[in-house]
Amino acid sequence: MIHYYHYYSKNDTNHLEKHKESIKSKILTDDMLTSGKVKKEKKRLSLLDTFFICLKKIFYFVCPSLKTMDGINNNDMNVIEKSKRSRMAVGEEDLNDTTTAVNKTMPHPTIVVDIGEEKLRKLKNEIIETFKDESKKMIREELKMLKDIIDGKVKVVEKELYNLDKNCKNVGKKKEEVVIDYTIVNNLIEKAIQKYDSDKTELVDYALESTGGRIVKASGDKGHLNTWSSIIEMLMIFQKPSPRIVIQRNSLNLIPGNAWCFEGDTGYIVIGLSYEIYITSVTYEHIHLENSPSGDLSSAPKDLEIFGTDESSYLCHNGTSIGNFTYKISEPSVQTFKIVEKSEKRYPMVKVRVKSNYGASYTCLYRIRVHGRQNFN
């Protein structure tokens, strides 16, 4: 048995709480309260409360009678304080006599505690459970704070998804509101067919043989080859088609080999027009690369010069040059060359002079068209 002698004071009762509040006031400074950092110190305050709870448990374990002393009134406390002062003044007075005097005033002045292993184990378990409960409480608060943060993030994402979905629906509505005017589509198709059926240019061809065009003169052709090997090599291509082939429309599409060819990379052809016209443009058409038996277009004309002429002058000279053009095999097969300078004279004939080709030893012309107007305006 261990004996504890405790003389109770109400100031002693509040001392523990005052000490705890003093520590809290040091943690929670005025700057912290105004800066919103209280949440960060919440853990420390919670642990402080837990510590003092455990401290009280230890006090109550050592001095169980402390639990019942809170009910003592002020008169009792004055009597106890006087007894304490009397005891201190007497000095040599026997301690047992002082204790007896106090016992008459205070119900439990002397505290006798039996500290055994079982009680210590019980105290230890109580303190552990107290810290466990506090830890669980702190974890719950942390999880709640984390949940609030996540919920806030989720709301932001949900709002963004909602706006995105709304925008997508608006885009979808805009797409649905697009109305296809099939009348316009049909007109475009009809126009394309008409253009293709109108000799692919939608322009009158005054050189066309079927409307009165004719070949007046042409330069030397491939009717005379130098060697028999050349004849055999180009037999299928040069069966001596007439120069008239360049102003004929035998089919919608050109037929490979159905062209007028001449030796070398230079030559000319003079075409009589169906009407005297102010020449505005000239069109040349060659076969597509995909339709070429040789796999290239090296025999196609490259640089061309156009002359306006008549029967009295074409034999003596070329006539009046009205334009120089380059046929590009990398572009569409039908290419129209506009006359830049407006002619003030009507011509009954056109001379097309080939100045170069794309590298072959011979040149082939497939289709030539001449466009213009009969009136000056």
Image: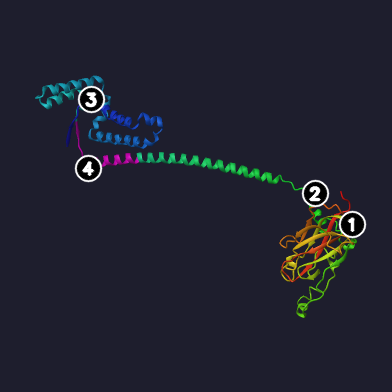
Secondary structure under the numbered disc 2 in the rendered image: helix
Please name the residue that numbered disc 4 is placed on: 117
The correct choice, above or below, for 371 with respect to 76 in the image is below
**How far apart in space, not on screen, are marks 2 and 4 (Cα)?**
104 Å
Classify mark 2: residues with Cα within 10 Å, few (<14), some (14-19) or many (20+): few
Secondary structure under the numbered disc 4 in the rendered image: helix
**How far apart in space, not on screen, are marks 1 and 4 (Cα)?**
135 Å
Q: 126 left or right of 111? A: right
The correct choice, above or below, for 34 with respect to 176 in the image is above
Measured as percent of width and height from the top left, residue 108 is found at: 21, 27
* Residue type, mark 2 in image: Thr
**How far apart in space, not on screen, are marks 2 and 1 (Cα)?**
40 Å
Asked if one can make out residue 44 in the rendered structure from this viewpoint, the answer is yes
Classify mark 3: residues with Cα within 10 Å, few (<14), some (14-19) or many (20+): some
Q: Earlier in the sequence, mark 2 or mark 4?
A: 4
Q: Nearer the viewer, residue 106 or 21?
A: 21
Residue visible at 77% across and 80% down in the picture: 228
Please name the residue that numbered disc 2 is placed on: 183
The span shown in magenta is: 111-133
**How far apart in space, not on screen, are marks 3 and 4 (Cα)?**
30 Å
Please name the residue that numbered disc 1 is placed on: 276
**How far apart in space, not on screen, are marks 3 and 1 (Cα)?**
137 Å
Q: Earlier in the sequence, mark 2 or mark 1?
A: 2
Confirm or deny contact between disc 3 and disc 4 (CB under 8 A): no
**How far apart in space, not on screen, are marks 3 and 2 (Cα)?**
107 Å
Please name the residue that numbered disc 3 is placed on: 9
